[in-house]
Image (cartoon, helix red, strand yellow):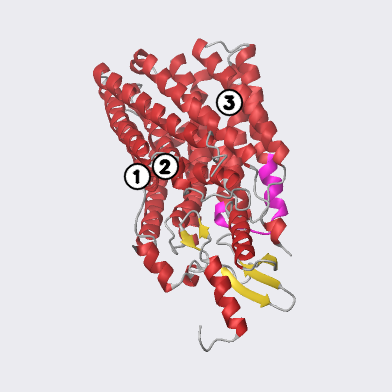
Amino acid sequence: MGVPDRLRTTPSGLVLPFYAYAAASFLASALLAFCSLDAFGEHHHHPHLLALTHSMALGWATMIIFGASYQLVPVLIERELYSIRMGYVSFAFLATGIPLLVGAFYAFDMGPLAKWGGRLVLLGFALYLINLSKSIALSRVRNIHVRFVHTAALWLFVVGAFGLVLVYNFTFRMLPGDPWKYLPLHAHAGVLGWFLMLILGIASRLIPMFLVSKYTNERLLVWIYYLVNSAMVIYIVEFYVPVLHSIAPLPWALLLAAVILFGTYCRGAYRMRLRRSVDAPMKMSLLSVLMILLPLVAMLAYLVAYAGRGGGGDQLLTTYGYLIFFGWITAIILGMTFKTLPFIVWNREYRPGSYSGKPPNPKDLYSDGLFKAGALAYLAGFAAFSTGIAIDHAGFMRVGAGLVVLAAAAYNVNAWKVLLHRKPTTK
Amino acid sequence: MNGMNANERHGLRAAEALQEVLDPEVNLNIVDLGLVYGIEVDPQERKLRCVLTLTTQFCPMGGSIVDGARVALERAFEGYAVDVDLKFDPPWAYGMISEAGRQFLNA
């Protein structure tokens, strides 16, 4: 009987702490943005912006992606995770390291706090990579989604290791030249190699699945995979070989092509869906795909207007960063949280045989009205804030940041409502 | 049920029981979703064997679906030893959704 093996999925006890940590980090990051409005008018190396970026990138996005991927990777590789314990230890390392790192950036103290934070975060990344690599090695399944996820985990480790080198570089000079000049390399390897690669790999599986769509196009996904990786490699080469600066827009053009192809893929999945109605979290997830275009357009505008002209355009670069972390990354997480979290909790609470009453629908575990209100606040706040940064308008930024705080609060109320849900003790 | 033999009647009863089991994600019952590959009822031995598949292997909701099928069958066939097996060959495909299931999703 093959039943027990095939049903050995990741325990919710491993997955849910990542969701909880991410929700709290999103609210903390939104509050940090609201309290650091002055920093958005300064250079993007401002300590509060570095703290905010790391709080969003690690505490919010990476933590929830780790949790979701511990749950979803077994579906992709058709095998259980190599080690659940390693997953728990990765949580402990990240949960401890992230606040140390964010606090160190906020105070811009690159001493022991930053170094310990960086070391712990890197250890968490290493465990994730080892766990994923071993799980994939033990599986016979090889598909493009697995390749996306594995490559993303490799990039994440490289980004983490390089980030730690950069932290050290502020006190022990290890790299030639200005220590700040390496920051874009670290940031882009993280955004493109880790976030974009991972999100494309998982979303290309989940979007058709949640739409109940029979659409598949592995060839298109292979193209997207190579376009994103080529963009990364060209970006790195161009960074180190100054004579190639004239090709600076090339990686962005390749990324634009990749995103357009991914949009085509999602459109195909949407058109061939068997499920007619599309719920609000799914609409938000689909909207996030379009939102990937915004930072790409901002970067291309920056390159056309300012690159090679000896400076300027810093507001545009800060806007670019905001469009990434508070834009498409946040939008897809807002949507996908409520396509996954209620099911994980429902599965824990209402497994048949363990509950005698009529179980609710997993979708009833969160408030759809609150989700929609939060989504509206988020979209309005995001639009106002990004406009505010781009035109350096304090009023827009204040209103935008306030709305994003409200959106983060709504998200937290809904997420915690699900996380704390327990089945009724009596019928 | 007139004109049906005992085996067919048992099979129908089992299918009706399994129609109470929903895939929580799509809210569609597992019979119309095409997850039921076979039902064998042995009234003499009071044994029932049901073969299911899942939309994906290691589906996070797989445990709930299998347990749900077992509970529904044990309720419909009291005193029977119910065995639920999983099979992934052939793998589930969208073409396995019944016409009624398509209409439900399309509503």
**In this rendering, is residue B84 above or below A227?**
below
- How packed mark 3 is, by other alpha carbons closer than 10 Å (few <14, some 14-19, many 20 or more), is many
Is residue A116 in view?
Answer: yes
Q: Secondary structure at mark 3?
A: helix
Q: Describe the element under mark 2 as helix, strand or loop.
A: helix
Distance of label 2 from label 1 (alpha carbons): 9 Å
Q: Amino acid at mark 2?
A: Gly
B7 sits left or right of A83 in the view: left
Q: Is residue A308 in view from this perspective?
A: no
The quadrant holding residue A33 is: top left
Q: Residue at x 64, y 64 (%)?
A: B74
The residue under label 2 is A335
Q: Quadrant of residue A274?
A: bottom left
Q: Which residue is mark 3?
A: A163
* Residue A133 drawn in magenta: yes
Residue segment shown in magenta: A130-145
Instruction: Tell me the amino acid under the disc marked 3.
Output: Gly
Percent position of residue B40, x then y: 66, 76
Q: Choose between B29 and A255: the one closer to the eye.
A: B29
